[in-house]
Image (cartoon, grey):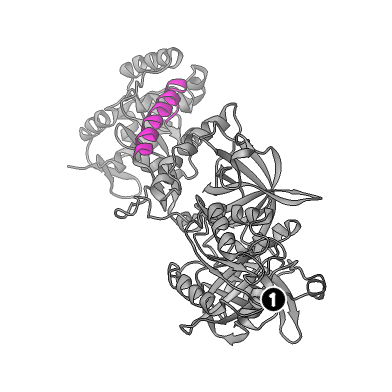
Amino acid sequence: MHVIATAGHVDHGKSTLLRALTGMEPDRWAAERDRGMTIDLGYVWGKLPSGGAVAFVDVPGHERFLGNMLAGVGPVPAVLFVVAADEGWMPQSGEHLAALDALGVRHGLLAVTRADLGDAPLAIAEARDYLRGTSLAGIAAVAVSPVTGAGLAELWGALDRMVHALPPPEPAAPVRLWVDRVFSVAGSGTVVTGTLGAGTIRVGDELQTSSGQRVRVRGLQALGQPVDRVSGVARVAVNARRTGRDELRRGTALLTPGRWWLTDRLDAWLDLSAPRQPADGPAEPPGGEAMLHIGSARVPARLRVLGTPHGTRFPVRLSLAAPLPLHVGDRALLCDEGRVRGARILGRVTVLDVSPPPLRRRGAAARRGAVLTGLPEVPDARAMLAQRGLLRRADLAPMGLAGDGNGGAGTAEPLAGDWLVDPDHVERLRERLREVVRAHQAADPLAPAMPTDAARQALALPDRRLVEALVEPPLAVVDGGIQDSRADRTLPPGPAAAVAQLRQELVARPFHPPEQERLAAAGLDRRALAAAERAGMLVRIADGVVLLPGADAQAAQVLRELPQPFTASAARQALDTTRRVLIPLLEHLDRHGYTERVDGTHRRCRP
């Protein structure tokens, strides 16, 4: 199936032409038929000369219903642009062309209707002048009269040639079906319709709405016939079984779960060139509130310009009133929707980042604008990784980023978990980690190491595993923290003097360390003693029991001179110490292989 939207000024015969082509009535509402003017979207279909099916989305031409027109053309890859021969190019013709050009619609066919009432060649020439310089420049043109039937066969042939030139659809792509109509069917429940641009929907599939609700596909129809599956591009009706109470409405999207980024904040290029005419003067970015149109959705958006413009393009931050499912590279329209005149197109939006950082500090907007200016027109994974520094591999597909973090030129291995980190950013982070660890040890020489989580916060990293992956010599992970092995381990003056005094006492009586209360009174608390041990000045054999380095080997030598095996009492007398020191000392000697137990009361020195 192929899907084509109409475009053109009000009352130029779009619906009449579709009626003549398909024999179906595109105007669904009585009010439309009574007034002879399309107000909402209409849908009809027919068969191409080559045998394929083509569906038409008929859009309103009146300026007050531009929002409805955008809902119809947004998801459609090609357009049938209608101009009446007896009236020629009109204001709304230009408005529709601006929208199509801004959306990047490059496939189309110009149909000049009422060829029996006006100068068709003149109307074609005039239209070609307006189309020149837009995405629809050079499209084929056919003069036709729905009343007399002249040109209908030629129009069908031109449509056949146009649709066969369309790019092939992607049946394996993630589904994003923008809903343009919702109604209920007795015995079936809720039915939604839309244009499926890519991907495949099957009966039984579970989809997700843009509000996060889960939807089960109970049934499908295409061109009025039930089907088990349908692939884009296609007009499709979905019988949806909802699992929540959120209302389905026009502008909702049915999505492949986990493949789209739901966001209410995005950074983008705003291009003001497409809808403007030379007489409009220099481009000026709109301020304050506007309406963002993408697919069939329209969402209020607050606009903030970031940095300086580049011609008619402005880097902008858009804050949305409701989240939308977006990919990097998506195109949308920004409109000013007045109460009287209706919607007016302000410019084209090209999405650059669907998860941008907050702008909190002074000058952040200008810096962010400079970053966006350095990105490609449509960033890929490598460009986004270079800009952000790090990305989760699992986030690449929902963001719509092409490549695998290495620009598609091989597989980039995550640094930790599934975190991809730009190589240049890795080196910057490692240098910064060395700085913060040194600063931490300088500020607190008694600390054993910088806690890993403190280092994570200092580097503003989202995962402590990233910190540990950044550690390389002279840094090392020790007891849940990070140390610099080359850092100066000199104790502060107070603890250093106390340790020096303690060492002098232990030289005189190696196995008579002061009790814990006296150590604390001298300023040697647990942290100070641990720092002295890390500096190689003391050895801790138990809480509150410290000896000089090598005291354990000295004790073992004394004990070797005793008759073997020996008792604890004999060892205490030989070492001239107390039971408070002796018991942990003997256990220390056992652990380090100097001594071993013989029975419950005796030990002996090992060879």
Task: Please determine whether, in this image, residue 470 is positioned above or below residue 404.
Answer: above
Q: Nearer the viewer, residue 80 or 201?
A: 80
Residue 348 horizontal/vertical position (percent): 58, 48
Query: Based on the displayed image, in which of its 4 quarters is residue 270 positioned?
Result: top right
Relative placement, left or right, of 393 versus 74 is: left
Q: Nearer the viewer, residue 498 or 137?
A: 137
Please give the name of the residue rendered at 75% of the width and 66% of the height, measured from the top-left corner: 39
Asked if residue 427 is among those painted magenta in the image, a careful observer would answer yes
Mark 1 surroundings within 10 Å by alpha-carbon count, few (fewer than 14), some (14 through 19), many (20 or more): many
Residue 587 horizontal/vertical position (percent): 35, 40
Residue 210 horizontal/vertical position (percent): 63, 62
Task: Please determine whether, in this image, residue 526 is positioned above or below residue 398.
Answer: above
Which contiguous range is marked in magenta? 424-448
Asked if residue 277 is among those painted magenta in the image, a careful observer would answer no
Q: Nearer the viewer, residue 122 or 49?
A: 122
Q: Secondary structure at mark 1?
A: loop
Q: Is residue 23 visible?
A: yes
Label 1 amino acid?
Pro
Magenta segment, prevailing SS (helix, strand or loop): helix
Please give the name of the residue rendered at 49% of the width and 24% of the height, measured from the top-left corner: 525
Relative placement, left or right, of 265 versus 437 is: right
Q: Is residue 293 visible?
A: no
Query: Based on the displayed image, in which of its 4 quarters is residue 90 positioned?
Result: bottom right
Residue 258 horizontal/vertical position (percent): 53, 63
Query: Based on the displayed image, in which of its 4 quarters is residue 591 positioned?
Result: top left
Label 1 belongs to which residue?
26
